[in-house]
Amino acid sequence: MEEALAILIGFLVACGAYLMMSSNLIRFLFGLVLISNAANLAIFAAGRMTHGLPALVPEGADTVAGDVANSLPQALILTAIVIGFGLFVFSLSLVLRTYAEFGTADSGGMRDAEPEDADRPATLDPELR
Amino acid sequence: MLLATPILLPLGTAILLFLLRRHPVHKLLSVISAGVLVIVGATILASTVANGPMAAQMGGWAAPYGITLAADTLSGAMVLIAGIAAFTALMFATVEVDEATDRLGFHALAHSMTGGVCGAFLTGDLFNLYVWFEVMLISSFGLLVIGGGRRQMDGAMKYVALNLVGTIAFLTGVGLLYGTAGTLNMADLGEKLQGRMDETAVMGAAGMLLFAFAAKAALFPVFFWLPASYHTPAAATSALFSALLTKVGVYSLLRVFTLIFDPGNEVVATALLVAAGFTIALGAIGAAAEGEMRRIFSFHIVSQIGVMTLGLAIGTKLALAGAIFYFFHHIPAMMGLILLGGLIGRECGSERLDRLGGLWTAGPWLGILFLIPMLSLIGVPPFSGFWAKFLMIRASFEAGDFIFGALILLASVLTFFYLGRVFVAAFWQPRPGLEGDAVPACYPHRLLVVPVMLLAVVTLAISLWPGNFFALADGAAGGLLDPAPYLGTVLGGQ
């Protein structure tokens, strides 16, 4: 089971990394989502894989009986999914606004904050040089 | 309860300010709340200095099962600094940030970011640290784009992209550590992982966390988001970011690579040394090539982050104390300079060096206020930067890393060059397009000048009494190198 999960994680990271190398921001974000899901699966695997052992306390008992699934990684992943979802929504709306401002979703065309050399301010008033 | 206050106060204030954001009183509340945070931070620091580390278990679940809040001298000092940074930057923002942006919730975002930063300084749980990072990140995203146009969107896109990648690396590292040690409490992790640095999973997790914190701290080779974005928002936002965000990255490096992973591990130390060296050099060279005030300051921050990381890379007590002293020196001086840059930009209508000028006749006292942080950042005695650089250079010479001491000295020469050029451009060159006498006299709003003066007073205090601040930094470094009291407080008793 762990092996299959490891292969899946590797596949997701590979796809994500490929998408993130694109200069298209939408592709970049999709790659990011794939990798963040791979990270969630990695945490899941770190909690050891079990099959059909829900972490439930039997009626009348105070603790779980015998081996059960580790519920902590599940709680961690839930938190990470919620956070990741919020960040993804923000990034998507940021890309949308950027697209509206620049008319392109290609990061190569965004040079407003860091202008190319020709548009850069001179370092001093030319007369003083 | 005291330990939860620096988190609950800003977050509660953020909610209140968001509800009141259309009411004029919300700016006053914002500054008052930040002022209270200063007092709380000072109380925590005083308590940790007097009685050693303190810890609180949230929800009454004993460590290592519950979430622990813990403070030692380093955390206490960082919370105090965060309070001072929020107080001064928000006071500046009450005038600088326009009405429309205020109505969108600028102050609420600033407080939720401060809350996230304080949470990161105080938590004793690795996953909780990740959550505070996210709180801080999402608020900083908001602050970066709020009320902005093309330039801000462009900067924010690059900032968001790289920080999200760092976040995923952080999360994966946390997962790997949990799989190896079965715990997430930082003190417990430290005990369980002692001497296990050569295991693949531990080293892999160390690498992930190193990358994540390096991206957050803006270390070479993942620093380029900082000069791409820090100059685009309001000057108050830039100043707040420069004081808090990168410093959380360096703080996390200091904490995690002394407490959880064995300090002085050869591989980690080498990686940090190389990254720190390149960061110092490239930051200084980048700053020298820029012609816009806040872009110069951005590259300068990068360069100084390298010096702080160098302290951890060298790893001796003097080096760690030097790095922590560097925090004390750098944050007020850098904030003062960025806020003044914003003020000068407002006076001259641009932040480009070729459009500044004439301010020496318009307001010579502004020049004096500029000289204090500038000389301090260059490292001219007796200003605070001299003591900070003296400590770091001495630490690297004592450890035999002569090249890094020399690098700090060379970077200081470059700092003199590029900060001096900003001074000459703003104060001594005639304002382009205006005759010498025609420069209008400069009467900036009082609330823009007071924060800069407060920060200058802090810088002067560190300059005149460096011994007291060094004793504090030395105590904090001692706590990092000998974690026994910290471990005892977190894991024992309660």
Image (cartoon, coloured by chain):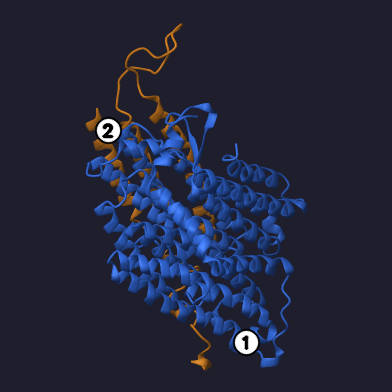
At horizontal 57% and vertical 53% (from top left) the residue drawn is B80
Q: Nearer the viewer, residue B130 or B186?
A: B186
At horizontal 51% and vertical 90% (from top left) the residue drawn is A126
- B222, above or below A57, in the image: below
Residue B75: give x, y in percent of width and height: 50, 48
**Residue under mark 2: which chain is it in?**
A
Q: Is residue B461 left or right of residue B253?
A: right
| Residue type at the position of mark 1 | Arg
User: Which quadrant holds residue A36?
Assistant: top left
Name the residue tied to disc 1: B431
Question: Can I make out residue A29 in this image?
Answer: no
Residue A23: mark in rendering: none
Name the residue tied to disc 2: A5
Q: Colour of chain A?
A: orange
Task: Write down which chain is painted blue.
Answer: B
At horizontal 30% and vertical 20% (from top left) the residue drawn is A51
Residue A35: give x, y in percent of width and height: 35, 44
Residue B74: give x, y in percent of width and height: 48, 51
Q: Is residue B453 left or right of residue B374?
A: right
Mark 2 element type: helix
Are discs 2 and 1 less than 8 Å apart at CB? no
